[in-house]
């Protein structure tokens, strides 16, 4: 019952095909095979979250403060953090204050699928208020089993975690299973640099009813995080802190029916609290309190009319409100609506080929902003071979739109550390893309060439004439991009390599902007190289490397080039194969690169731990 999309080029998912013949017809069934594009799955400095290790994912540029699990700006294809959505089931999670908190997702990673990155037409169809890309998750079936973990490391790191799941068939309905799972995780550390300490914990649980053609999940999660970092958001040489509390209640139902048709209904309630302190040594200088509440209901699916025609659709409605000590213009609530419809036509050609054409539109509206209609379309050619290999070529053009968060539009436009802009309008993005996927038994190659026009994109900027604040300003940007991802599968190893190129032309339509914190903070060139090596039955080595050459920025201290490495070695004794002993290191070369201009980079982190599975 996995959601099937015409995923564009870059490939957490790669496509294979199988052929089914009857007396009168031959059909091609597309199968999406899931595979990660990072070697490591666990972080080094804390417990795992849904965004852990995305900083080594070639499709994503993750710009962190302290660490990815502290405050993570997740960007896709040269966008900024507010252009990226996080979707679980059919609903996009949201924080109306700022996209800095989009990735606050209090869900144990065992409960979710690996992330699928939606761009182009798929993001325009399924995304919500995320004009460039969406990180998409599914709720996983619950299995019986569990684990307990503990670890220590330098910088006085210590972490503990316990997880357990249980699934059983119903007595009077053996095709149905009832599952329940729960986890508790915590970690604390003095941090990889001075005043970079953290103290986190998360508790989450889920109940699931799984049937032959349906899955229903009820989830609740809570997490609390305290962390500090010098110059976390401001360039004034102070030690800032944040204390975050996030609660998430979600209900999800997924159903298949008829001729390869499916739908999914998702609803959630999210409450998030943020206590920001400008200076931990002098808290009274400036501090801010925010509480956001979001409720949403969404449905998406594919209704297959016959073997040739189908209808993709998505509808989401959302309402939010904020209680804040920094908002001044009474813009403290908003309702959002989006409806997308994307008809598709599929026809089988000679030589085991298939042509799929999709064309439709999305409608976006709020009770405070002008509405917009966006075109969505793509054409995909697929050829499958009897040995399981395939080739796929696609061309897409898609439009998407979003509105700015409350920090950008609801605060003071003349005072304070973060200056809002009351003239910001609805942002739009137009994406033209050509991509190809080559899938073989032992290797996969994905490539994409794209051009994106962002109009009225909200960015945070800096003026040397007024160094007291960051200001929200609109910018028009044209982004050119090229991406390659290759995966090679060997007998005892897997190798993942990628190269990405980005170039931008920007127009702020103002002369008093000297530097950009986000929209112009991107790598011109980026290379990743990951490997998973299993030399023996008891030893596994995982390594991720990332090299980048960043666009010059007047606020950045230090080099514009950086090399990061994360290494994990896992030993499982033959006498007790349920036990895993892990040694890990992140930032092996002690790289000091500023991922956010003016904000110090992270330092080295080593850890050793053990996990027992049952």
Image: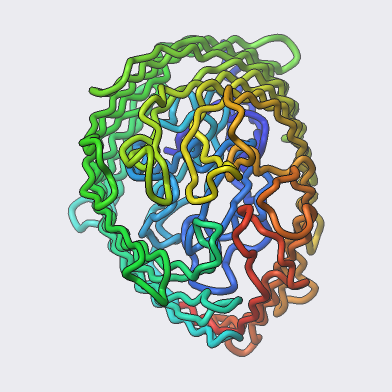
Q: Nearer the viewer, residue 37 or 140?
A: 37
Q: Is residue 323 visible?
A: yes
Residue at 49 percent across and 63 percent down: it is 69
Q: Nearer the viewer, residue 325 or 360?
A: 325
Q: Nearer the viewer, residue 434 or 329?
A: 329
Q: How many marks?
A: 0
Determine which quarter of the picture holds residue 361. top left
Residue at 77 percent across and 40 percent down: it is 524
Q: Quadrant of the C terminus?
A: bottom left
Residue at 38 percent across and 18 percent down: it is 340
**Residue 380 x/y as whole percent:** 64, 17
Q: Quadrant of the N terminus?
A: top left
> Tell me, what colour scheme is on the image?
rainbow
**Residue 272 x/y as whole percent:** 28, 55
**Residue 252 x/y as whole percent:** 28, 43
Left or right: 455 in relation to 16: left
Look at the picture and state if 418 lies above or below 545: above
Q: Nearer the viewer, residue 168 or 403?
A: 403
Residue at the front extreme? 465
Residue at 74 percent across and 72 percent down: it is 590
Left or right: 115 in relation to 218: right
Residue at the left extreme? 172
Determine which quarter of the picture holds residue 575. bottom right
Look at the picture and state if 261 lies above or below 371: below
**Residue 513 x/y as whole percent:** 59, 35
Look at the picture and state if 405 lies above or below 454: below
Left or right: 444 in relation to 601: right
Look at the picture and state if 508 lies above or below 43: above
Q: Is residue 213 visible?
A: no
């Amino acid at each position: 019952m996995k959601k099937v999309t015409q995923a564009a080029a870059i490939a957490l998912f790669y496509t294979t095909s199988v052929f089914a013949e009857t007396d009168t017809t031959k059909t091609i069934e597309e199968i999406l095979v899931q595979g990660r594009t990072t070697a490591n799955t666990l972080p080094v400095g804390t417990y795992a979250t849904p965004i852990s290790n995305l900083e080594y994912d070639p499709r994503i540029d993750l710009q962190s403060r302290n660490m990815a699990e502290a405050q993570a700006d997740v960007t896709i294809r040269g966008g900024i953090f507010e252009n990226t959505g996080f979707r679980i089931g059919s609903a996009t999670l949201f924080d109306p204050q700022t996209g800095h908190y989009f990735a606050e997702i209090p869900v144990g990673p065992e409960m979710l699928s690996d992330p699928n990155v939606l761009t182009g037409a798929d993001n325009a169809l399924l995304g919500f208020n995320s004009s460039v890309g969406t990180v998409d998750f599914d709720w996983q079936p619950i299995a019986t089993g569990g684990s307990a973990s503990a670890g220590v490391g330098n910088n006085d790191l210590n972490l503990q975690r316990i997880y357990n799941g249980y699934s059983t068939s119903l007595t009077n309905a053996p095709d149905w299973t009832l599952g329940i799972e729960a986890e508790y995780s915590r970690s604390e550390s003095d941090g990889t640099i001075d005043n970079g300490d953290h103290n986190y914990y998360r508790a989450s649980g889920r109940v699931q009813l799984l049937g032959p053609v349906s899955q229903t999940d009820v989830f609740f999660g809570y997490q609390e995080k305290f962390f500090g970092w010098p110059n976390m958001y401001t360039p004034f040489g102070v030690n800032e802190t944040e204390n975050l509390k996030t609660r998430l209640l979600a209900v999800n139902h997924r159903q298949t029916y008829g001729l390869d048709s499916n739908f999914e209904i998702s609803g959630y309630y999210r409450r998030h609290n943020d206590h920001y302190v400008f200076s931990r040594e002098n808290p009274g200088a400036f501090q801010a309190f925010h509480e956001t509440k979001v409720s949403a209901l969404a449905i998406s699916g594919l209704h297959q009319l016959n073997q040739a025609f189908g209808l993709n659709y998505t509808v989401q409605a959302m309402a939010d409100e904020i209680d804040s000590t920094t908002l001044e213009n009474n813009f403290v609530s908003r309702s959002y609506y989006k409806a997308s419809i994307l008809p598709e036509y599929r026809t089988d050609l000679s030589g085991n080929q298939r042509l799929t054409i999709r064309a439709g539109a999305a409608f976006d509206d709020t009770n405070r902003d002008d509405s917009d209609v966006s075109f969505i379309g793509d054409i995909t050619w697929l050829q499958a071979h009897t040995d399981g290999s395939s080739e796929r070529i696609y061309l897409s053009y898609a439009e998407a739109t979003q509105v700015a968060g409350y920090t950008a539009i609801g605060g003071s436009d003349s005072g304070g550390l973060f200056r809002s802009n009351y003239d910001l309008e609805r942002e739009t993005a137009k994406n033209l893309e050509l991509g190809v996927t080559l899938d073989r038994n032992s290797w996969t190659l994905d490539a994409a060439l794209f051009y994106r026009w962002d109009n009225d994109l909200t960015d945070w900027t800096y003026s040397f004439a007024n160094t007291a604040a960051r200001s929200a300003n609109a910018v028009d940007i044209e982004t050119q991009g090229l991406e390659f991802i290759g995966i090679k599968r060997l007998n005892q190893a897997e190798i993942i390599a990628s190269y990405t190129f980005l170039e931008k032309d920007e127009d702020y339509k103002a002369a008093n902007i000297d530097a950009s914190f986000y929209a112009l903070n991107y790598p011109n060139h980026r290379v990743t190289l990951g490997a998973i090596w299993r030399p023996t039955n008891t030893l596994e080595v995982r390594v991720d490397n990332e090299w980048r050459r960043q666009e010059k920025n007047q606020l950045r201290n230090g080099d514009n080039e950086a090399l990061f490495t994360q290494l994990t070695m896992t030993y499982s004794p033959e006498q007790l194969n349920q036990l895993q002993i892990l040694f890990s290191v992140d930032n092996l070369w002690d790289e000091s690169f500023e991922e956010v201009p003016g904000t110090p980079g992270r330092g080295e982190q080593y850890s050793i731990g053990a996990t027992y599975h049952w």
